[in-house]
Image: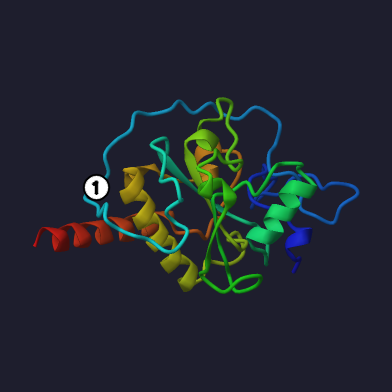
Amino acid sequence: MRSFFGIVACGAMVAASGCSSQRASSWKYPPPLFDTRAERPTAPQPRVQPAPSAPAIAGEPGWLPPGGIKQKWTDIVIHHSASRSGGAAAFDRYHRTVQHWDELGYHFVIGNGTDTRDGQVEVGGRWTKQKHGAHCKTPDNYYNEHGIGICLVGDFSKTSPSAAQLASLQRLLLFLTARCHIPVSRIRTHGGVTHKTQCPGRNFPLAQVQRNLTLSQRRMATAGSQ
């Protein structure tokens, strides 16, 4: 099985599954994140208040940026790396060296036990700075400007997220939906936005993630009212 540097980082258009595209000729890195062809337009939707949530959630160190969270985030977009291994440092290096971007394209990366421990949530510089993402290109760039990009390390067209990854994802989503007033219905997948990729893979359980998050929000809201 190929390592991260032989497999595409999530964000490019797929041919069959994952996020792979054409390979850069002089680098043993994944191909570019984005396809340059036009993608299906997705009109922005008005902000909707989420299901009962807990705005007092503190989250983990680094989840709350030093300057606070800007009121511009309306969506959360989930990706997989389409690689066996990786982490924020490896993806950041690829994005800078090959894509010539200023930094990691995602806001958060959740490890799988290869480069970082299983379920470890790494906070990207874009979240710390509250800066637009580079993970979900659309004609109007709405989901890069207003979508929080979360990448889980792994190729979920072949395997499934680990229990630790899903548990960390739920904690992170609980924090983000409460702090940013994002409804569960606006937790999306990369492929669900662009319809040009299977990212984060056919084995990613979006419906289960949304259902478990809703139950957690209700439990916390009930506990907070007592």
Asked whether residue 8 appears in the rendered view, the answer is: no
Left or right of 170: which side holds 28?
right
The extreme left residue here reads 226
Left or right of 169: which side holds 79?
right
User: Residue 151: image x %, image y %?
Assistant: 56, 55
Give the image quarter of residue 217: bottom left
- Are there few (<14), some (14-19), or many (20+) residues within 10 Å of tag 1? some
The extreme front residue here reads 66
User: Residue 100: image x %, image y %?
Assistant: 76, 41
Height in image: 169 above or below 163? above
Asked whether residue 75 appears in the rendered view, the answer is: yes
**Quadrant into which the C terminus falls:** bottom left
Work out whether residue 221 or residue 41 is closer to the camera in this orientation and state it: 221
Kindly identify the amino acid type of the residue bearing the numbered disc 1: Ala
Q: Which residue is mark 1?
A: 51
Which residue lies at the image location 63% right of the left edge and 45% below the top edge? 11
Which residue lies at the image location 62% right of the left edge and 46% below the top edge? 105
**At numbered mark 1, what does the secondary structure look like: helix, strand or loop?**
loop
